[in-house]
Amino acid sequence: MQTEAAPRAVQDGDAEIKLDARHVNFFYGDFQALHDAALSVRARRITALIGPSGCGKTTFLRIFNRMHDLTPGTRATGEVLLDGHNVLSSDTDVIRLRRQVGMLFQRPNPFPKSIFDNVAYGPHMLGWSKARINQVVEESLKDTGLWDEVKTRLHRSALNLSGGQQQRLCLARALAVEPQVILMDEPASALDPIATLRIEELMQDLKQRYTIVIVTHNMQQAARVSDFTAFMLMNEKRAGEVIEYGPTDDIFNRPKDSRTEDYITGRFG
Amino acid sequence: MSRPMVRILIDRFFGALIVLSVMMAAIPVLVLLLFVVIKGLPGLLTPGFFTDPPFPQGVPGGGVFNAIIGTLEIVGIGSLLAVPIGSLIGIYLSEYGRNQIGDAVRFISDVLTGLPSIAFGIFGYTVVVLTTHHFSAISASIALAVLMLPVILRATESALVLVPQSLREAGLALGAPRWRVTLEIVVPAALGGIVTGALLAMARAAGETAPLLFTAFGNDIVQTNPFQPMGALSLTVFRNALVPYNNLQDQAWAAALLLVMLVAATNILARLYVRRSQH
Protein backbone atom coordinates (compact mmCIF):
# COMPACT_ATOMS: atom_id res chain seq x y z
CA MET A 1 0.00 0.00 0.00
CA GLN A 2 2.69 2.45 1.00
CA THR A 3 4.73 1.86 -2.10
CA GLU A 4 1.69 2.62 -4.28
CA ALA A 5 1.44 6.08 -2.80
CA ALA A 6 5.00 6.96 -3.76
CA PRO A 7 4.89 7.78 -7.49
CA ARG A 8 1.50 9.50 -7.19
CA ALA A 9 2.66 11.83 -4.43
CA VAL A 10 5.94 12.71 -6.06
CA GLN A 11 4.31 13.63 -9.35
CA ASP A 12 1.74 15.73 -7.53
CA GLY A 13 4.28 17.65 -5.53
CA ASP A 14 3.55 20.85 -7.36
CA ALA A 15 -0.25 20.65 -7.66
CA GLU A 16 -1.98 23.98 -6.99
CA ILE A 17 -2.48 24.95 -3.35
CA LYS A 18 -6.14 25.07 -2.26
CA LEU A 19 -5.85 25.84 1.45
CA ASP A 20 -2.80 27.52 2.89
CA ALA A 21 -2.46 27.81 6.67
CA ARG A 22 0.35 30.06 7.88
CA HIS A 23 1.52 30.92 11.40
CA VAL A 24 -1.71 29.68 12.95
CA ASN A 25 -1.96 30.05 16.72
CA PHE A 26 -5.04 28.92 18.59
CA PHE A 27 -6.18 29.66 22.12
CA TYR A 28 -8.81 28.21 24.43
CA GLY A 29 -9.00 31.17 26.79
CA ASP A 30 -5.41 31.60 28.01
CA PHE A 31 -4.32 28.12 26.98
CA GLN A 32 -2.50 27.94 23.67
CA ALA A 33 -3.50 24.78 21.80
CA LEU A 34 -1.68 25.41 18.50
CA HIS A 35 1.65 27.11 18.00
CA ASP A 36 2.74 28.54 14.66
CA ALA A 37 1.09 25.76 12.67
CA ALA A 38 1.44 25.76 8.90
CA LEU A 39 0.01 23.52 6.20
CA SER A 40 -0.28 23.85 2.43
CA VAL A 41 -3.16 21.67 1.27
CA ARG A 42 -2.99 20.80 -2.40
CA ALA A 43 -6.10 20.76 -4.56
CA ARG A 44 -7.71 17.39 -5.35
CA ARG A 45 -5.31 15.52 -3.10
CA ILE A 46 -5.78 13.85 0.26
CA THR A 47 -3.84 15.41 3.11
CA ALA A 48 -3.63 13.52 6.40
CA LEU A 49 -2.98 15.01 9.83
CA ILE A 50 -1.45 12.45 12.18
CA GLY A 51 -0.01 12.58 15.67
CA PRO A 52 -0.67 11.43 19.23
CA SER A 53 -3.86 12.32 21.14
CA GLY A 54 -4.12 15.93 22.22
CA CYS A 55 -1.62 17.27 19.69
CA GLY A 56 -4.19 19.63 18.16
CA LYS A 57 -5.04 17.78 14.93
CA THR A 58 -8.79 18.20 15.31
CA THR A 59 -8.39 21.76 16.59
CA PHE A 60 -6.34 22.60 13.50
CA LEU A 61 -8.89 20.97 11.18
CA ARG A 62 -11.86 22.80 12.71
CA ILE A 63 -10.20 26.16 12.10
CA PHE A 64 -10.36 25.57 8.33
CA ASN A 65 -14.15 26.08 8.25
CA ARG A 66 -14.33 28.19 11.40
CA MET A 67 -16.11 25.52 13.45
CA HIS A 68 -14.12 26.82 16.41
CA ASP A 69 -16.40 29.88 16.38
CA LEU A 70 -18.99 27.68 18.08
CA THR A 71 -16.83 27.23 21.18
CA PRO A 72 -16.98 30.37 23.33
CA GLY A 73 -13.66 31.80 24.49
CA THR A 74 -11.59 30.52 21.56
CA ARG A 75 -9.37 32.62 19.32
CA ALA A 76 -7.33 31.88 16.22
CA THR A 77 -4.56 34.10 14.85
CA GLY A 78 -2.47 33.85 11.70
CA GLU A 79 -4.00 33.13 8.33
CA VAL A 80 -5.74 30.31 6.53
CA LEU A 81 -5.98 31.19 2.86
CA LEU A 82 -8.72 29.54 0.82
CA ASP A 83 -8.01 30.41 -2.82
CA GLY A 84 -6.09 33.42 -1.52
CA HIS A 85 -8.74 34.76 0.87
CA ASN A 86 -8.04 34.58 4.60
CA VAL A 87 -10.92 32.65 6.20
CA LEU A 88 -9.86 33.85 9.66
CA SER A 89 -10.45 37.51 8.82
CA SER A 90 -13.49 39.09 10.43
CA ASP A 91 -15.16 39.94 7.09
CA THR A 92 -15.34 36.29 6.02
CA ASP A 93 -18.89 35.12 5.30
CA VAL A 94 -18.81 32.04 7.55
CA ILE A 95 -22.03 30.64 6.08
CA ARG A 96 -20.54 30.76 2.58
CA LEU A 97 -17.19 29.42 3.80
CA ARG A 98 -18.86 26.35 5.30
CA ARG A 99 -20.66 25.67 2.03
CA GLN A 100 -17.27 25.64 0.32
CA VAL A 101 -15.53 23.68 3.05
CA GLY A 102 -17.70 20.79 4.22
CA MET A 103 -17.09 18.50 7.16
CA LEU A 104 -17.47 14.85 8.08
CA PHE A 105 -17.41 14.13 11.81
CA GLN A 106 -15.96 11.44 14.02
CA ARG A 107 -19.30 9.83 14.72
CA PRO A 108 -22.05 9.61 12.10
CA ASN A 109 -24.52 12.39 12.93
CA PRO A 110 -27.49 12.07 10.56
CA PHE A 111 -30.46 14.31 11.30
CA PRO A 112 -33.42 12.43 12.80
CA LYS A 113 -35.18 12.79 9.45
CA SER A 114 -35.62 10.60 6.39
CA ILE A 115 -32.68 9.56 4.22
CA PHE A 116 -33.88 11.88 1.47
CA ASP A 117 -34.38 14.84 3.81
CA ASN A 118 -30.88 14.42 5.22
CA VAL A 119 -29.24 14.84 1.84
CA ALA A 120 -31.78 17.41 0.65
CA TYR A 121 -31.31 19.61 3.71
CA GLY A 122 -28.46 21.70 2.29
CA PRO A 123 -29.92 22.09 -1.24
CA HIS A 124 -33.34 22.89 0.22
CA MET A 125 -31.74 25.58 2.38
CA LEU A 126 -30.07 27.04 -0.70
CA GLY A 127 -33.51 27.34 -2.30
CA TRP A 128 -32.83 25.05 -5.24
CA SER A 129 -35.71 23.83 -7.41
CA LYS A 130 -37.38 20.55 -6.61
CA ALA A 131 -36.05 18.92 -9.76
CA ARG A 132 -32.52 20.03 -8.99
CA ILE A 133 -32.80 18.81 -5.39
CA ASN A 134 -34.03 15.39 -6.53
CA GLN A 135 -31.16 15.20 -8.96
CA VAL A 136 -28.48 16.24 -6.49
CA VAL A 137 -29.80 13.82 -3.83
CA GLU A 138 -29.55 10.94 -6.28
CA GLU A 139 -26.09 11.98 -7.46
CA SER A 140 -24.75 12.44 -3.95
CA LEU A 141 -26.09 9.07 -2.85
CA LYS A 142 -24.57 7.46 -5.95
CA ASP A 143 -21.23 9.18 -5.27
CA THR A 144 -21.16 7.64 -1.81
CA GLY A 145 -22.24 4.20 -3.02
CA LEU A 146 -25.48 4.35 -1.03
CA TRP A 147 -28.00 4.74 -3.85
CA ASP A 148 -28.52 1.05 -4.57
CA GLU A 149 -28.78 0.29 -0.86
CA VAL A 150 -31.39 2.96 -0.04
CA LYS A 151 -33.23 3.88 -3.26
CA THR A 152 -36.32 1.89 -2.24
CA ARG A 153 -36.53 3.47 1.22
CA LEU A 154 -35.53 7.08 0.70
CA HIS A 155 -38.34 8.31 2.92
CA ARG A 156 -37.60 6.06 5.86
CA SER A 157 -35.67 7.33 8.87
CA ALA A 158 -31.93 7.66 8.42
CA LEU A 159 -31.46 6.38 11.98
CA ASN A 160 -32.29 2.84 10.86
CA LEU A 161 -29.17 2.65 8.69
CA SER A 162 -26.02 0.89 9.92
CA GLY A 163 -23.16 2.98 11.28
CA GLY A 164 -21.18 2.74 8.06
CA GLN A 165 -24.21 3.64 5.95
CA GLN A 166 -24.96 6.57 8.26
CA GLN A 167 -21.43 7.88 7.81
CA ARG A 168 -21.70 7.60 4.03
CA LEU A 169 -25.08 9.36 4.25
CA CYS A 170 -23.39 12.19 6.17
CA LEU A 171 -20.79 12.35 3.41
CA ALA A 172 -23.56 12.48 0.77
CA ARG A 173 -25.21 15.26 2.77
CA ALA A 174 -21.96 17.23 2.74
CA LEU A 175 -21.43 16.62 -1.01
CA ALA A 176 -24.95 17.81 -1.85
CA VAL A 177 -24.06 21.48 -1.28
CA GLU A 178 -21.20 21.08 -3.76
CA PRO A 179 -18.22 21.97 -1.55
CA GLN A 180 -14.66 22.30 -2.80
CA VAL A 181 -12.92 21.01 0.29
CA ILE A 182 -14.04 18.23 2.64
CA LEU A 183 -12.63 18.06 6.15
CA MET A 184 -12.80 14.64 7.78
CA ASP A 185 -12.31 14.28 11.52
CA GLU A 186 -11.40 10.62 12.12
CA PRO A 187 -14.33 9.63 9.92
CA ALA A 188 -13.86 5.89 10.38
CA SER A 189 -13.03 5.68 14.07
CA ALA A 190 -16.54 4.53 14.98
CA LEU A 191 -16.80 2.05 12.09
CA ASP A 192 -15.92 -1.60 11.61
CA PRO A 193 -13.08 -2.60 9.22
CA ILE A 194 -15.37 -3.26 6.23
CA ALA A 195 -17.18 0.06 6.59
CA THR A 196 -13.82 1.76 7.09
CA LEU A 197 -12.59 0.26 3.82
CA ARG A 198 -15.68 1.58 2.02
CA ILE A 199 -14.96 5.10 3.28
CA GLU A 200 -11.30 4.84 2.24
CA GLU A 201 -12.25 3.65 -1.25
CA LEU A 202 -14.74 6.48 -1.54
CA MET A 203 -12.04 8.99 -0.65
CA GLN A 204 -9.98 7.81 -3.61
CA ASP A 205 -12.96 8.37 -5.94
CA LEU A 206 -13.81 11.72 -4.44
CA LYS A 207 -10.36 13.22 -4.71
CA GLN A 208 -10.83 13.47 -8.47
CA ARG A 209 -13.15 16.38 -7.69
CA TYR A 210 -12.58 17.41 -4.10
CA THR A 211 -9.73 18.46 -1.87
CA ILE A 212 -9.73 16.30 1.26
CA VAL A 213 -8.08 16.87 4.64
CA ILE A 214 -8.36 13.96 7.05
CA VAL A 215 -7.43 13.71 10.72
CA THR A 216 -6.62 10.18 11.76
CA HIS A 217 -5.23 8.33 14.76
CA ASN A 218 -4.53 5.42 12.53
CA MET A 219 -1.10 5.64 10.89
CA GLN A 220 -1.84 2.74 8.53
CA GLN A 221 -4.93 4.61 7.35
CA ALA A 222 -2.91 7.76 6.68
CA ALA A 223 -0.33 5.72 4.77
CA ARG A 224 -3.04 3.93 2.76
CA VAL A 225 -5.19 6.86 1.73
CA SER A 226 -3.23 10.09 1.75
CA ASP A 227 -0.95 11.82 -0.74
CA PHE A 228 0.51 14.20 1.82
CA THR A 229 0.94 13.81 5.55
CA ALA A 230 1.57 16.29 8.32
CA PHE A 231 2.90 14.99 11.62
CA MET A 232 1.88 17.00 14.68
CA LEU A 233 3.14 16.91 18.24
CA MET A 234 2.69 18.85 21.46
CA ASN A 235 5.58 21.10 22.42
CA GLU A 236 6.85 21.52 26.00
CA LYS A 237 4.00 23.99 26.72
CA ARG A 238 1.41 21.47 25.49
CA ALA A 239 0.66 23.51 22.36
CA GLY A 240 0.36 21.54 19.10
CA GLU A 241 2.97 22.08 16.40
CA VAL A 242 3.42 20.75 12.89
CA ILE A 243 6.71 18.87 13.11
CA GLU A 244 7.03 17.65 9.59
CA TYR A 245 4.97 17.85 6.42
CA GLY A 246 5.53 16.32 3.03
CA PRO A 247 4.52 13.60 0.59
CA THR A 248 3.15 10.65 2.54
CA ASP A 249 5.82 8.35 1.17
CA ASP A 250 8.59 10.59 2.47
CA ILE A 251 7.03 10.99 5.92
CA PHE A 252 6.62 7.25 6.36
CA ASN A 253 9.79 6.01 4.65
CA ARG A 254 12.28 8.86 4.86
CA PRO A 255 11.27 11.10 7.77
CA LYS A 256 13.65 14.01 8.26
CA ASP A 257 12.83 14.66 11.90
CA SER A 258 13.82 12.05 14.49
CA ARG A 259 10.53 12.65 16.38
CA THR A 260 8.54 11.74 13.27
CA GLU A 261 10.61 8.60 12.88
CA ASP A 262 10.04 7.66 16.53
CA TYR A 263 6.27 8.05 16.15
CA ILE A 264 6.06 6.25 12.80
CA THR A 265 8.05 3.31 14.06
CA GLY A 266 5.93 3.11 17.19
CA ARG A 267 8.53 4.18 19.72
CA PHE A 268 5.95 6.46 21.38
CA GLY A 269 2.43 7.78 20.91
CA MET B 1 -24.95 -16.83 65.57
CA SER B 2 -22.71 -17.54 62.60
CA ARG B 3 -21.71 -14.63 60.37
CA PRO B 4 -23.69 -15.80 57.29
CA MET B 5 -26.81 -15.98 59.47
CA VAL B 6 -26.29 -12.38 60.60
CA ARG B 7 -25.85 -11.27 56.99
CA ILE B 8 -29.03 -13.01 55.92
CA LEU B 9 -30.98 -11.46 58.78
CA ILE B 10 -29.69 -7.99 57.97
CA ASP B 11 -30.59 -8.55 54.32
CA ARG B 12 -34.14 -9.60 55.29
CA PHE B 13 -34.52 -6.62 57.60
CA PHE B 14 -33.57 -4.07 54.96
CA GLY B 15 -35.61 -5.86 52.30
CA ALA B 16 -38.66 -5.55 54.54
CA LEU B 17 -37.82 -1.90 55.18
CA ILE B 18 -37.86 -1.19 51.44
CA VAL B 19 -41.24 -2.89 50.97
CA LEU B 20 -42.58 -0.89 53.91
CA SER B 21 -41.32 2.39 52.40
CA VAL B 22 -42.95 1.63 49.07
CA MET B 23 -46.22 0.89 50.82
CA MET B 24 -46.02 4.08 52.85
CA ALA B 25 -45.61 6.04 49.63
CA ALA B 26 -48.21 4.17 47.62
CA ILE B 27 -50.98 3.59 50.17
CA PRO B 28 -52.00 7.24 50.72
CA VAL B 29 -52.23 7.78 46.96
CA LEU B 30 -54.23 4.60 46.41
CA VAL B 31 -56.54 5.34 49.35
CA LEU B 32 -57.12 8.84 48.06
CA LEU B 33 -57.88 7.63 44.54
CA LEU B 34 -60.17 4.89 45.88
CA PHE B 35 -61.97 7.41 48.08
CA VAL B 36 -62.54 9.82 45.19
CA VAL B 37 -63.76 7.01 42.95
CA ILE B 38 -66.16 5.58 45.55
CA LYS B 39 -67.51 8.98 46.55
CA GLY B 40 -67.53 10.43 43.06
CA LEU B 41 -68.87 7.58 40.96
CA PRO B 42 -72.55 7.89 42.01
CA GLY B 43 -72.57 11.58 41.09
CA LEU B 44 -70.73 10.92 37.87
CA LEU B 45 -73.35 8.35 36.83
CA THR B 46 -76.29 10.60 37.69
CA PRO B 47 -78.22 11.49 34.51
CA GLY B 48 -77.52 15.05 33.43
CA PHE B 49 -74.17 15.36 35.27
CA PHE B 50 -72.27 15.97 32.06
CA THR B 51 -75.00 17.79 30.16
CA ASP B 52 -76.97 19.96 32.63
CA PRO B 53 -75.90 23.26 34.15
CA PRO B 54 -76.24 23.49 37.95
CA PHE B 55 -79.78 23.84 39.28
CA PRO B 56 -80.55 26.30 42.08
CA GLN B 57 -79.68 25.12 45.59
CA GLY B 58 -82.34 22.79 46.98
CA VAL B 59 -83.57 21.76 43.55
CA PRO B 60 -82.62 18.14 42.88
CA GLY B 61 -80.52 17.21 39.82
CA GLY B 62 -78.31 19.52 37.81
CA GLY B 63 -74.84 18.96 36.41
CA VAL B 64 -71.48 20.54 35.76
CA PHE B 65 -71.72 21.24 32.04
CA ASN B 66 -70.83 24.88 32.74
CA ALA B 67 -67.71 23.83 34.64
CA ILE B 68 -66.52 21.35 32.00
CA ILE B 69 -66.82 24.02 29.30
CA GLY B 70 -65.18 26.54 31.65
CA THR B 71 -62.18 24.38 32.55
CA LEU B 72 -61.57 23.49 28.90
CA GLU B 73 -61.86 27.11 27.77
CA ILE B 74 -59.87 28.69 30.60
CA VAL B 75 -57.03 26.16 30.34
CA GLY B 76 -57.25 26.25 26.54
CA ILE B 77 -56.79 30.02 26.31
CA GLY B 78 -54.12 29.89 29.03
CA SER B 79 -52.22 27.27 27.00
CA LEU B 80 -52.52 29.31 23.81
CA LEU B 81 -50.79 32.11 25.69
CA ALA B 82 -48.25 30.10 27.67
CA VAL B 83 -47.14 27.36 25.26
CA PRO B 84 -45.78 29.58 22.45
CA ILE B 85 -44.18 32.10 24.82
CA GLY B 86 -42.83 29.41 27.16
CA SER B 87 -41.32 27.28 24.42
CA LEU B 88 -39.76 30.32 22.72
CA ILE B 89 -38.13 31.32 26.03
CA GLY B 90 -37.00 27.70 26.48
CA ILE B 91 -35.43 27.75 23.00
CA TYR B 92 -33.67 31.00 23.84
CA LEU B 93 -32.33 29.59 27.11
CA SER B 94 -31.00 26.43 25.53
CA GLU B 95 -29.56 27.83 22.30
CA TYR B 96 -28.55 31.39 23.22
CA GLY B 97 -28.91 31.66 26.98
CA ARG B 98 -25.42 30.81 28.24
CA ASN B 99 -25.08 34.31 29.67
CA GLN B 100 -26.27 36.57 32.47
CA ILE B 101 -29.65 37.27 30.84
CA GLY B 102 -30.23 33.53 30.60
CA ASP B 103 -29.26 33.02 34.23
CA ALA B 104 -31.61 35.82 35.29
CA VAL B 105 -34.50 34.25 33.35
CA ARG B 106 -33.77 30.83 34.89
CA PHE B 107 -33.72 32.36 38.37
CA ILE B 108 -37.03 34.18 37.88
CA SER B 109 -38.58 31.04 36.45
CA ASP B 110 -37.46 29.02 39.49
CA VAL B 111 -38.95 31.64 41.80
CA LEU B 112 -42.23 31.49 39.86
CA THR B 113 -42.29 27.70 40.17
CA GLY B 114 -42.06 27.93 43.93
CA LEU B 115 -44.74 30.61 44.34
CA PRO B 116 -48.03 29.55 46.01
CA SER B 117 -50.69 29.32 43.33
CA ILE B 118 -52.97 31.88 44.99
CA ALA B 119 -50.31 34.49 44.18
CA PHE B 120 -51.06 33.93 40.50
CA GLY B 121 -54.72 34.54 41.29
CA ILE B 122 -53.85 37.84 42.93
CA PHE B 123 -51.83 38.70 39.85
CA GLY B 124 -54.79 38.03 37.54
CA TYR B 125 -57.10 39.92 39.89
CA THR B 126 -54.86 42.99 40.10
CA VAL B 127 -53.83 43.18 36.47
CA VAL B 128 -57.08 42.23 34.71
CA VAL B 129 -60.06 42.17 37.07
CA LEU B 130 -59.29 45.51 38.74
CA THR B 131 -58.59 47.27 35.44
CA THR B 132 -61.65 45.86 33.63
CA HIS B 133 -63.84 46.12 36.75
CA HIS B 134 -65.30 42.64 36.50
CA PHE B 135 -64.42 38.99 36.86
CA SER B 136 -63.66 37.14 33.65
CA ALA B 137 -62.41 33.83 32.27
CA ILE B 138 -59.63 35.64 30.47
CA SER B 139 -58.19 36.93 33.75
CA ALA B 140 -58.08 33.31 34.96
CA SER B 141 -56.42 32.22 31.71
CA ILE B 142 -53.75 34.88 32.16
CA ALA B 143 -53.14 33.85 35.77
CA LEU B 144 -52.85 30.19 34.71
CA ALA B 145 -50.62 31.11 31.77
CA VAL B 146 -48.12 32.75 34.13
CA LEU B 147 -48.33 29.67 36.35
CA MET B 148 -47.68 27.36 33.38
CA LEU B 149 -44.87 29.45 31.92
CA PRO B 150 -41.97 28.27 34.12
CA VAL B 151 -42.99 24.61 33.74
CA ILE B 152 -43.09 24.89 29.94
CA LEU B 153 -39.90 26.88 29.50
CA ARG B 154 -37.87 24.62 31.78
CA ALA B 155 -39.23 21.48 30.07
CA THR B 156 -38.40 22.97 26.68
CA GLU B 157 -34.91 23.92 27.77
CA SER B 158 -34.14 20.48 29.21
CA ALA B 159 -35.49 18.76 26.09
CA LEU B 160 -33.33 20.93 23.81
CA VAL B 161 -30.20 20.58 25.93
CA LEU B 162 -30.49 16.81 25.45
CA VAL B 163 -30.20 17.17 21.66
CA PRO B 164 -26.63 16.11 20.84
CA GLN B 165 -24.25 18.94 19.99
CA SER B 166 -23.15 16.89 16.97
CA LEU B 167 -26.52 17.52 15.29
CA ARG B 168 -26.09 21.28 15.61
CA GLU B 169 -22.54 20.98 14.24
CA ALA B 170 -23.78 18.89 11.32
CA GLY B 171 -26.24 21.60 10.33
CA LEU B 172 -23.83 24.47 10.82
CA ALA B 173 -21.08 22.67 8.88
CA LEU B 174 -23.43 22.57 5.89
CA GLY B 175 -23.49 26.35 5.97
CA ALA B 176 -26.90 26.63 7.62
CA PRO B 177 -27.41 29.78 9.70
CA ARG B 178 -27.91 29.21 13.39
CA TRP B 179 -31.63 30.07 13.43
CA ARG B 180 -32.36 27.52 10.70
CA VAL B 181 -30.43 24.81 12.54
CA THR B 182 -32.38 25.62 15.71
CA LEU B 183 -35.83 25.63 14.08
CA GLU B 184 -35.36 22.88 11.49
CA ILE B 185 -33.11 20.40 13.28
CA VAL B 186 -32.83 20.98 17.02
CA VAL B 187 -36.47 21.77 17.83
CA PRO B 188 -37.94 18.86 15.79
CA ALA B 189 -35.46 16.50 17.46
CA ALA B 190 -36.72 17.63 20.88
CA LEU B 191 -40.42 17.91 20.02
CA GLY B 192 -41.37 14.93 22.19
CA GLY B 193 -39.99 16.57 25.32
CA ILE B 194 -41.47 19.96 24.47
CA VAL B 195 -44.98 18.55 23.91
CA THR B 196 -44.74 16.52 27.12
CA GLY B 197 -43.79 19.61 29.11
CA ALA B 198 -46.73 21.52 27.65
CA LEU B 199 -49.18 18.70 28.43
CA LEU B 200 -47.95 18.38 32.02
CA ALA B 201 -48.27 22.13 32.50
CA MET B 202 -51.83 21.98 31.14
CA ALA B 203 -52.67 19.13 33.49
CA ARG B 204 -51.36 21.12 36.43
CA ALA B 205 -53.27 24.23 35.41
CA ALA B 206 -56.53 22.29 34.99
CA GLY B 207 -56.39 21.21 38.62
CA GLU B 208 -55.68 24.63 40.12
CA THR B 209 -58.37 26.26 42.23
CA ALA B 210 -56.79 29.20 44.00
CA PRO B 211 -55.87 31.20 40.86
CA LEU B 212 -59.52 30.99 39.70
CA LEU B 213 -61.22 32.13 42.92
CA PHE B 214 -61.14 35.84 42.24
CA THR B 215 -60.52 35.77 38.50
CA ALA B 216 -62.96 33.40 36.75
CA PHE B 217 -65.01 33.60 39.96
CA GLY B 218 -67.47 30.89 38.89
CA ASN B 219 -70.76 31.00 37.02
CA ASP B 220 -73.76 28.67 37.22
CA ILE B 221 -74.86 29.66 33.74
CA VAL B 222 -73.13 28.04 30.78
CA GLN B 223 -70.84 30.82 29.63
CA THR B 224 -68.51 30.74 26.65
CA ASN B 225 -67.62 34.43 26.45
CA PRO B 226 -64.10 34.68 27.88
CA PHE B 227 -64.76 38.22 29.07
CA GLN B 228 -67.51 37.06 31.45
CA PRO B 229 -67.24 35.15 34.74
CA MET B 230 -67.02 31.42 34.10
CA GLY B 231 -67.34 28.17 36.03
CA ALA B 232 -64.60 25.56 36.34
CA LEU B 233 -64.44 22.03 37.70
CA SER B 234 -62.09 22.96 40.51
CA LEU B 235 -64.43 25.79 41.52
CA THR B 236 -67.37 23.38 41.52
CA VAL B 237 -65.48 21.11 43.91
CA PHE B 238 -64.56 24.03 46.15
CA ARG B 239 -68.06 25.60 46.29
CA ASN B 240 -70.28 22.51 46.33
CA ALA B 241 -68.27 20.76 49.02
CA LEU B 242 -69.25 23.51 51.45
CA VAL B 243 -73.04 23.56 50.94
CA PRO B 244 -75.47 21.48 53.01
CA TYR B 245 -77.21 19.78 50.06
CA ASN B 246 -76.48 16.13 49.35
CA ASN B 247 -76.91 16.31 45.59
CA LEU B 248 -74.44 19.23 45.37
CA GLN B 249 -71.92 17.45 47.62
CA ASP B 250 -72.20 14.41 45.33
CA GLN B 251 -71.54 16.74 42.41
CA ALA B 252 -68.43 18.06 44.15
CA TRP B 253 -67.06 14.50 44.50
CA ALA B 254 -67.97 13.68 40.94
CA ALA B 255 -66.31 16.87 39.69
CA ALA B 256 -63.18 15.95 41.67
CA LEU B 257 -63.18 12.49 40.09
CA LEU B 258 -63.64 14.00 36.63
CA LEU B 259 -60.74 16.35 37.28
CA VAL B 260 -58.51 13.48 38.45
CA MET B 261 -59.41 11.51 35.33
CA LEU B 262 -58.71 14.52 33.11
CA VAL B 263 -55.28 15.08 34.67
CA ALA B 264 -54.45 11.36 34.60
CA ALA B 265 -55.47 11.13 30.94
CA THR B 266 -53.25 14.10 30.06
CA ASN B 267 -50.32 12.55 31.92
CA ILE B 268 -50.78 9.22 30.17
CA LEU B 269 -51.06 11.00 26.83
CA ALA B 270 -47.80 12.83 27.53
CA ARG B 271 -46.03 9.59 28.42
CA LEU B 272 -47.33 7.81 25.34
CA TYR B 273 -46.18 10.69 23.19
CA VAL B 274 -42.66 10.52 24.64
CA ARG B 275 -42.50 6.77 24.15
CA ARG B 276 -43.61 7.12 20.53
CA SER B 277 -41.24 9.97 19.70
CA GLN B 278 -38.26 8.09 21.15
CA HIS B 279 -38.36 5.64 18.25
Image (tube, coloured by chain):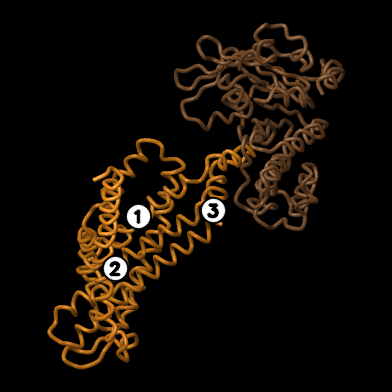
- Give the image quarter of residue B115: bottom left
Quadrant location of the C terminus of chain A? top right
Q: Position of residue A170 (x, y in %)?
A: 68, 42
Tint of chain A = brown
**Which chain hosts label 3?**
B
Mark 1 vs 2: CB contact within 8 A = no
- Residue A158: mark: none
Q: Is residue A152 above or below residue A249?
A: below
Amino acid type at mark 1: Val
Quadrant location of the N terminus of chain A? top right
- Give the image quarter of residue B104: top left
Per the image, the residue denoted by label 2 is: B207
At 69% from the left and 10% from the top, the residue drawn is A261
Mark 3 vs 2: CB contact within 8 A = no
Mark 1 vs 3: CB contact within 8 A = no
Instruction: Describe the element under mark 1 as helix, strand or loop.
Output: helix
In space, the residues marked 1 and 2 are separated at their CA atoms by 15 Å
Q: Residues within 10 Å of mark 2 (few under 14, many from 20)?
A: some
Per the image, the residue denoted by label 3 is: B188
Q: Position of residue B230 (x, y in %)?
A: 27, 76
Amino acid type at mark 3: Pro
B144 left or right of A254?
Answer: left
> Chain drawn orange, letter?
B
Q: Position of residue B248 (x, y in %)?
A: 20, 85
Per the image, the residue denoted by label 1 is: B151
